[in-house]
Image (cartoon, grey):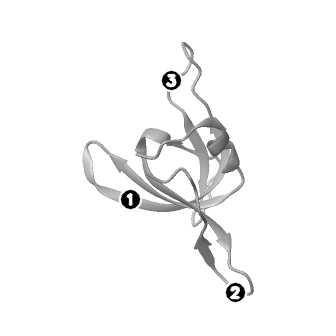
Amino acid sequence: MADFNTPTALSLLGRTAMVELVWDDDPRPLWVCVHILGVVLRLDGVYEHPHFLTMDVHELEPFPNEMFWTNIRRLYPLRWRDGARGFRPAPCDCEA
């Protein structure tokens, strides 16, 4: 799984990313392209499940979704290519 810390997670705010998600009960990974809108951090004794608040790039939904860090296998922040249309992966130290 991807290993996030607070500075890395906060650096992803406002970014668009390709994310590979996995779950224990489903062996097939799911790739999604999302905008990262928020970060919910772990707080000892209060909340133990850090996650991102995200919006799917391709679906118009009224509210963000929770993307728990424990389900993220890989995350690739995207950036616009210079002089071209489309996105390309940008380096991220959070990749597993």
Amino acid type, callout 2? Ala
Residue 65 to residue 90: above or below: above
Residue 50 to residue 10: above or below: above
Give the number of the mark in front: 1 or 3. 3
Helix or strand or loop: what does disc 3 sit on?
loop
Q: Earlier in the sequence, mark 1 or mark 3?
A: 1
The image quadrant where one finds the N terminus is top left
Task: Report whether 69 appears left or right of 52.
Answer: left
Q: CA distance from mark 2 to mark 1?
A: 27 Å
List x then y, in percent, for residue 41: 61, 31
List x then y, in percent, for residue 87: 62, 75
Q: CA distance from mark 1 to mark 3?
A: 24 Å
Q: Dot 2: few (<14), some (14–19), or many (≥20) neighbours within 10 Å?
A: few
Q: Which mark is residue 69?
A: none
Q: Which mark is residue 30?
A: 1
Q: In the rendered structure, are the residues bearing label 2 and label 1 in contact, judged by CB atoms less than 8 Å apart?
A: no
* Closer to the camera in the image, 88 or 85: 88
The residue at the far bottom in this view is 83
Q: Which mark is residue 84?
A: 2
Amino acid type, callout 3? Glu
Q: Which residue is mark 3?
A: 48
